[in-house]
Each structure stands twice: as C-alpha cells, then as structure tokens.
Image (tube, helix red, strand yellow):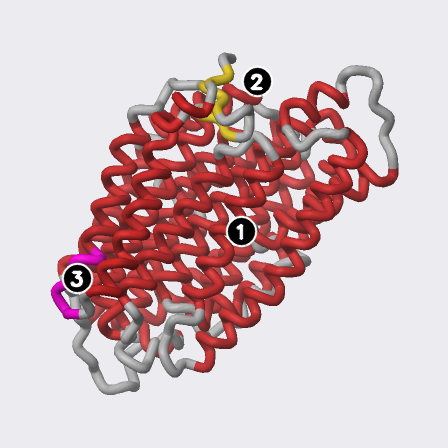
C-alpha cells in the first residue's frame, strides 16, 4: 500500500470535510438568523450534507489508501460503515423535521450535533491508529452527551444526559488505559504495526498486555451496550429525544462494533484464544439479560433499549468465532438492525405528542383498527427484530448463528437460538395490543406527515428486500472484510 503525503491526502476525506463544513454552517445559520424559515433551512442543509457526503463516499468503493502517515485509512470496510452512518443520519434528519418543533429543541444545535456525531463515527471506523480512534470516539460521544439533554424542561432528558456523560467518562478511561497498556508493551499505537510486532517472535505476552486487552473490551463493551457495561442503556434511551435514541441505537452501536472489529481482528487476532473466551461469556450474558429484562417492560422505549442490548449479544457471537471471513455476518446484521430500529422508533415518535411521549404499551392498543398501515409496518419492524422469516432480521441471525456453527461453537449457537425464541414473546406482545386489544384511552389523532411516512416506508421496504434478496448485501459485506483476510 502506498502512503500518501498529507498535501495530497485531503481528497480522500472529502466526505468528512463535507459533514464538518455543513455542521459549522448550520451553527452559523442559527446564530445569525433565528427565524422559522432559517431553522427549516438548517434541517435541509444537514440532510443535503449527509446526502452529498453519501454520494462522494460511494465513489470511494474499491479504493485502498493509507493517509496521514498511517493514522487514517481508506478501504472498503470503512466505506461500508460510512455509507451505513450516512443513511442513518439522513433518515434521522428527515424524521426530526417535525419532532424538533414538537419538542421545542434548538434547531441549530440539534442538527449540528447530529453531524458532528456522524463525523466522529466516520473517523472511528477508518482509523488505523489508537489516537485517531480515540479522537473519533470523543467527537461522537461529546455530541451525544449534549443531544440526550436537549429536551427543554424534561427531567428525564437531563438525567439521561448526565448518566451518559458520567458513565461514558468511566468507559473512556477504561479504553484509554487499554490503549496505554498495549502501547507500553508494544511501543506502538498503530494497529498494523502492533500486529506485525506480536507476530515477529520478539514479543512476550505480559500481564500488562492482557490487562490492556481487558480494558479495551470494557471500553468497547460500554459503547456497544454489552453486559455488564449496559446499565446506562434503558435510562438514557428512555430519557433522550426519540430520534436521538434511534441515532444511538443504530449509529453508535455500528461505529463501536466497526472499531471493535478493526482493532481485535487486526492487532489482537493472534491472542484470539484469550479474548474469545471473555467475549463468549459477555455474549451469553448480553443476550440473556437483555431478553429476560425486556420481557417485563411495559414502556416500549425501554423494551427497545433492552432489545438493543440483546442484539449486541447476537452480534458478539460472530466476533467470538475469530474467523475474519465470517465477520461479514456482523456487517450484514448491523445493516439490517439499522432499518429495524429506525422504523420502530419512528412509530414511537408518531404515537407521541408535545410533552407526552406516550411510550406505554397501552397506547398501542387498537392501533391496527385506527391506523392499519402504521400497525402493519410496526409489525414488520417487530417481526424482523424477532427474526421472523423472510425479513432481514431472520437472515441476519441466520448468518450470525451459521458463523458460530462453522466455527464449532455449537453451544453458543444453541443459546442464541433459545434467546431468539424468548424474544418473540415481548415483540408479539406489542402486536397483540395493536391487533387484539381495544384502547381504553381517548382516541388521539396521529400526525402522519410525509417525512415520517417516508422513513417508515423506506425502512419497511429495506427489511423486506434485504430478507428476500440477501445475496447482494452479503456480497458487499464480504467484500468489505477482505482487508482482514
């Protein structure tokens, strides 16, 4: 691979530059003009920035280049994740158009922070160095700390922001300690150089290096909401503005797993036998705790929060195998998971109103009678989350469990299947309320605006298309992980 000098490297990071410039422009618009029209323009500028960056990012497919003295890399793995992040941000921006007015959220700050969070995610998955991974993580995290608390006068929102900030600071410390211990043992922060050194024959496995691996698992475990680092998830997901919750449940999780994969499947793969056992235990605990706790939730946002914990456990199954070729199942699963969650959270937004989120399961009673199309789409999202064929969620679980079977982790695959069976209960419970329960509350009109319906239709179509025709998407995922093989 050719190492490009910085003067000519900026053309490779045009998508990141577009996102950063649009974020700054949105802030300036809010500062110098606070009218209603300018606020709408801020939203459309954020959407335009995400779409333009997506177009430029797609042109980087099949390109491989290390830039900025190996601090940053352009490859299909990073490009795949960037496309996912940009699609997420575009959909979140569309469904936020009405929500920001209803929740009295500051327009400029909101959309700028969304774009800065996106920028951090893009940096994380394309970093070849612990320093740039940490920079991306902090840009993403600081943006989200503020986004969680943007609901004016809402105590739950303030609590969510405060909890996420405090626990996120601890997780960041763990991650930094892990990076420091690995650096102290290997003398390098470059992921590829660490991999070369540990295979050179001059490396000796020390307690400090093993502690570094453990701290890295703890740091990434917090961001992926894996047990026992998951305690922040239900409170933060419930208290944050619902579009932000969808952004966290999809974008943050995908970015964290992307960085997780790059670090552990490049620098730390020779020690797979050690960290694989730890991840085996974490995967089982994450699936089981997430699903069992979700069974007793009456608040749909909290239920989806525990559901996201369980799905992190399913994704960890593929990481446990240590097979770089099978890691493509992680990318496919994350892509399907994106549309499942964004669609479900959009329906949650639609059932709410100003000052009342209406996230209790009782508010879903009789929804099929009043809004049959909305109930039908919500059923698609819930059944896909449960893993019902032929939807994308089923194919995602099929590939993940197949990876475990191919790697001879039969017990882990069986535990995953049993957890999926348990999950059917709480997803079908919501459907039962929608179709077979009469509402005991006064009927309220739902604002079925074009923006909301567009996001719902795109998400439902993606899940059906990816489930019936998974081959093309899986081939893209496999092409993206060729860098590990």
Q: Earlier in the sequence, mark 2 or mark 1?
A: 1
Q: Position of residue 55 (x, y in %)?
A: 25, 33
Q: Is residue 38 left or right of residue 189?
A: left
Residues at marks 2 and 1, CA–CA distance in whole angstroms: 30 Å
Picture residue at 49% right of the left edge, 36% below the top: 125
- Name the residue rendered at 27%, 79% in the picture: 354
Q: Secondary structure at mark 2?
A: loop
Q: In the figure, residue 84 lies in which quadrant?
A: top left
Would you name the residue on which mark 2 appears?
A: 485
- Which badge, 3 or 1, comes first in the chain's sequence? 3
- 371 versus 485 height, above or below: below
Q: Which mark is residue 138?
A: 1
What are the residue bounds of the magenta stretch?
35-43
Is residue 434 part of the magenta span, yes or no?
no
Q: Is residue 42 magenta?
A: yes
Q: CA distance from mark 3 to mark 1?
A: 28 Å
Task: Give the class, few, some or many, for how many residues have Cα within 10 Å of label 2's Cα (few <14, many ≥20).
Answer: few
> Does any portion of residue 289 appear in the rendered image?
no
């Amino acid at each position: 691979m050719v190492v490009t000098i910085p003067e000519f490297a900026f053309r490779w990071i045009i998508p990141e530059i577009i996102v950063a410039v649009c974020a700054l422009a949105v802030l300036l618009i809010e500062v110098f003009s606070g009218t209603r029209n300018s606020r709408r323009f801020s939203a459309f500028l954020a959407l335009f920035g995400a779409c333009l960056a997506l177009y430029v990012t797609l042109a980087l497919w099949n390109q491989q280049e290390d830039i900025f003295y190996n601090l940053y890399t352009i490859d299909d793995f990073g490009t795949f994740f960037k496309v996912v992040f940009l699609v997420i941000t575009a959909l979140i921006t569309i469904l936020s158009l009405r929500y920001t007015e209803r929740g009295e959220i500051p327009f400029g700050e909101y959309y700028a922070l969304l774009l800065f969070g996106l920028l951090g995610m893009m940096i994380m998955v394309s970093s070849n160095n612990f320093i740039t991974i940490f920079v991306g993580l902090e840009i993403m995290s600081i943006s989200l700390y503020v986004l969680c608390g943007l609901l004016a006068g809402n105590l739950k929102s303030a609590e969510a922001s405060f909890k996420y900030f405090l626990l996120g600071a601890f997780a960041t410390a763990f991650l930094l300690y892990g990076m420091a211990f690995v650096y102290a043992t290997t003398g390098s922060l470059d992921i590829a150089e660490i991999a070369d050194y540990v295979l050179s024959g001059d490396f000796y496995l020390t307690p400090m290096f093993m502690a570094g691996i453990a701290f890295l698992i703890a740091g990434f475990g917090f961001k992926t909401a894996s047990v026992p680092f998951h305690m922040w998830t239900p409170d933060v997901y419930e208290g944050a503005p619902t579009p932000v919750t969808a952004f966290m449940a999809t974008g943050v999780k995908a970015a964290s797993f992307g960085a997780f994969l790059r670090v552990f499947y490049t620098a730390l793969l020779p020690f797979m036998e050690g960290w694989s056992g730890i991840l085996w235990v974490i995967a089982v605990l994450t699936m089981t705790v997430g699903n069992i706790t979700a069974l007793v939730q009456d608040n749909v946002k909290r239920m989806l929060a525990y559901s996201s914990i369980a799905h992190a456990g399913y994704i960890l199954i593929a990481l446990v195998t240590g097979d770089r070729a099978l890691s493509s199942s992680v990318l496919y699963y994350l892509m399907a998971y994106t549309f499942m969650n964004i669609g479900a959270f959009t329906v949650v937004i639609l059932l709410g109103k100003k000052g009342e989120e209406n996230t209790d399961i009782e508010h879903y009673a009789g929804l099929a009678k009043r809004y049959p199309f909305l109930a039908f789409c919500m059923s698609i999202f819930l059944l896909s989350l449960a893993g019902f064929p032929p939807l994308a969620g089923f194919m995602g679980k099929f590939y993940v469990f197949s990876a475990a079977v191919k790697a001879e982790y039969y017990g882990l695959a069986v535990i995953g299947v049993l957890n999926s069976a348990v999950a059917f209960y709480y997803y079908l419970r919501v459907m039962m309320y929608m179709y077979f329960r009469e509402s005991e509350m006064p009927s309220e009109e739902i604002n079925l605006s074009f923006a909301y319906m567009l996001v719902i239709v795109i998400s439902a179509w993606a899940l059906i298309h990816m489930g019936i025709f998974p081959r093309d998407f899986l081939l893209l995922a496999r092409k993206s992980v060729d860098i590990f093989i």
